[in-house]
Structures are given as structure tokens and as C-alpha cells.
Amino acid sequence: MAMKLDHDDLNRLIEKISSSDIQEFSLEGEDFKLEIKRNLLDQNQVFNNLVSNASSDRQAIANQKSISDNVPLVSEPATPQVAPPGRSDLVEITAPMVGTFYRAAAPGEEPFVEVGNNVKVGQTICILEAMKLMNEIESEFNAEIIEILVENGTPVEFGQVLMRVKQS
């Protein structure tokens, strides 16, 4: 069954998604792929950023509308972010799940690790938030942090390289 989406259909779809609790939505046709990913702030972040949910949601809707006005329906599949090639002596720590990468336990707190730090097996190196659950990611080996490849607060894909370390 062929599916035709016109500009109004797309706007109605985005409006529905933005007023719902849906965080990720994907729709694929023969000649297009539509992906919408939202990063809803939790209450602590909202309080810390002094932003009310209502205004940020309205802003998100306004942003989505203005963006959708210029978005062609036919889009090439997005190319995933690829980490720059690494040195052969380094071990890559990859995301065990899809989520949002956080370097510290809470905004304003010290990051778990910095480049140059030595970490021990079982030491927390970052948090991946998935569906409001904070998952502490622990080091699987004793190592020195050589590179941190993801910005704080950035969504990451399963298997994406988060850090490179040198085993000790």
C-alpha cells in the first residue's frame, strides 16, 4: 500500500507527536524516511534551567513547525555519527544502549572522569539515561581515559563509541 503524505498531513502528524508523550517516532515509505526524536527534560533539569515545561513544549512545537516548513518530504537516510579512527593501542568503550550521555551525576557536579584519569574495574565512568532511568556505565578494566568522544547531554546510539581508553 503506497502512502502519500502532503504538507498538511506532516504538520498534523508533528503536532500530534509534540503534544503526546512519544519520545521517538519513525515512519518509512518507499521514497522517504521520517524520524522524530524528542529529548524531554526531567523535572530537576527543568528546575535547574529555570524553564517551565509548558513554555519549552510550546517552544519545541514552534521549532518543529518552523523546521517542518523547510523540510522536503523525501530525505536521504541520516548518516550516523562515526567516531574518528582511533589508535590501535586504545580500547573503545561503546554505548550498551540507546540513551542520553551524561558525564556527571547531576548538572553542576564534577564529571565522573576526565581525559587523563585512571579508572579501575567497576568505577562509574558516565550515565546513560534511557526512559527516565539513569544507568551507570562502569569501566570493564583498569585503564587511562584518553578520549571522551561525546558531549554531555547528547543522545547516543547503541554501539556508539563514547570513550577511548588505554588499558593498564
Image (cartoon, rainbow, N blue to C red):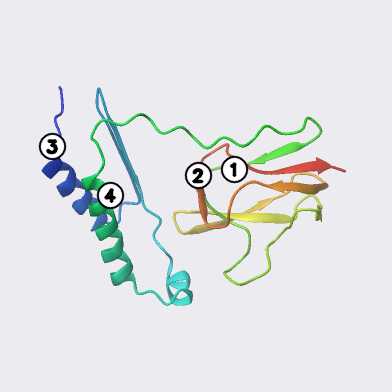
Q: Earlier in the sequence, mark 1 or mark 3?
A: 3
Marks 1,2: beta carbons within 8 A: yes
**Other residues around mark 1 within 10 Å, as few (<14) / some (14–19) / many (≥20):** some
**Label 1, label 3: how many angstroms apart (C-alpha)?**
37 Å
Of badges 3 and 2, the one in the foreground is 3
Rounded to the nearest angstrom, the CA distance separating label 3 from label 4 is: 15 Å
For label 2, the residue is: 98
Q: Could you say whether the residue bearing mark 1 is in a helix, strand or loop?
A: loop
Q: Name the mark nearer the viewer: 1 or 3.
A: 3
- On the image, which quarter does residue 166 sit in? top right
The residue under label 1 is 95
In which quadrant is the C terminus drawn?
Answer: top right
The answer to whether the residue labelled 3 contacts the one labelled 4, judged by CB atoms less than 8 Å apart, is no
Q: Badge 3, how many Cα within 10 Å: few under 14, some, many 20+?
A: few
As drawn, which residue projects farthest toward the front?
Answer: 70
Element type where label 2 sits in the image: loop
48, above or below 101, in the image: below
Residue at mark 4: 67
**Helix, strand or loop under label 4:** helix
Graded by Cα atoms within 10 Å as few (under 14), some (14 to 19) or many (20 or more), the crowding at tag 2 reads some
Q: Which residue is at the front of the view, 97 or 17?
A: 17
**Three-letter amino acid code at the position of disc 4:** Ile
The residue lying at 40 percent from left, 56 percent from top is 39
The N terminus sits in image quarter? top left
